[in-house]
Image: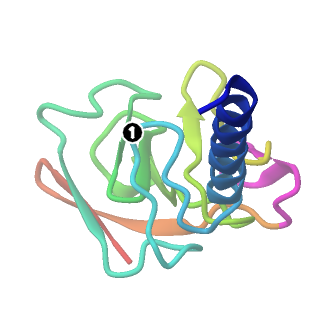
Amino acid sequence: MKRKEFINVLSGGIAATCVSCLVAACSKDDSGGGNITPNPGGGGVGTNSVTVNLDSELKSVNDFVAKSGVIVIRKASGNTPASFLALSSVCPHAGATVEYNNGQSTFYCAAHGSAFAADGAVTQGPATKGLTKLTVEVTGATLSVKA
């Protein structure tokens, strides 16, 4: 193989890889960003449920857990449902996973730059609606979130 042929083959492969990455970044099945797996259906948590042991997790105000397409944040002391906020971690714009910044009490979607306030309301697009709020139930030291 001549050097010119080799360079053409190599650059074509790199270009195809870059296009594949761009397409994946804009798809609804994007699972990039953070340690949260988005719900493949987008927009909510579907039939997922999350259980948190309050004896070992979410002990301090602004502590959070993120799992199964849900972010749960302790907003106040006490183990009552009003002490917690549960939101879908699925960005309403294109279904990518949002991350919670507990230092600023904000959410951010790295896929397209949408930002959300502490209550999940959209503060910067391209998303046009906020994160889906979910119902929290507390029984003893067990917190449950179901959709």
Q: Secondary structure at mark 1?
A: loop
* Residue 40 relative to residue 114: left or right: left
Q: Where does residue 83 sit, x and y in percent of width and height?
A: 42, 46
List x then y, in percent, for residue 82. Answer: 44, 54
Which one is in front, 11 or 20?
A: 11
Work out whether residue 7 or residue 87 is closer to the camera in this orientation and state it: 7
The amino acid type, in three-letter code, at marker 1 is: Asn
Q: Percent position (x, y) of residue 74?
A: 41, 38
Please tell me whether residue 77 belongs to the stretch shown in magenta. no
Residue count near mark 1 (Cα–Cα under 10 Å), binned few <14, some 14–19, many ≥20: some
Q: Name the quadrant of the N terminus.
A: top right
Q: Is residue 52 visible?
A: yes
Q: Is residue 54 above or below residue 119?
A: above
Q: Which residues are magenta?
A: 115-128
Please state the total of marks drawn on the protein image: 1
Q: Judge left or right: residue 14 versus residue 115.
A: left
Whether 2 is drawn above or below 72: the answer is: above
Q: Tell me if residue 108 can be seen.
A: no
The reply to whether the magenta stretch includes residue 127 is yes
* Residue ID at (44%, 68%): 39
In-front residue for pair 68/4: 4
Rendered residue at 61%/65% (across/down): 95
Q: Would you identify the image quadrant in which residue 79 lies?
A: top left
Q: Which residue is mark 1?
A: 35
- Relative depth, front residue between 56 and 45: 45
Which residue does the image show at 32% across and 81% down from the upper left?
47
In-image side of 114 versus 87 (left or right): right
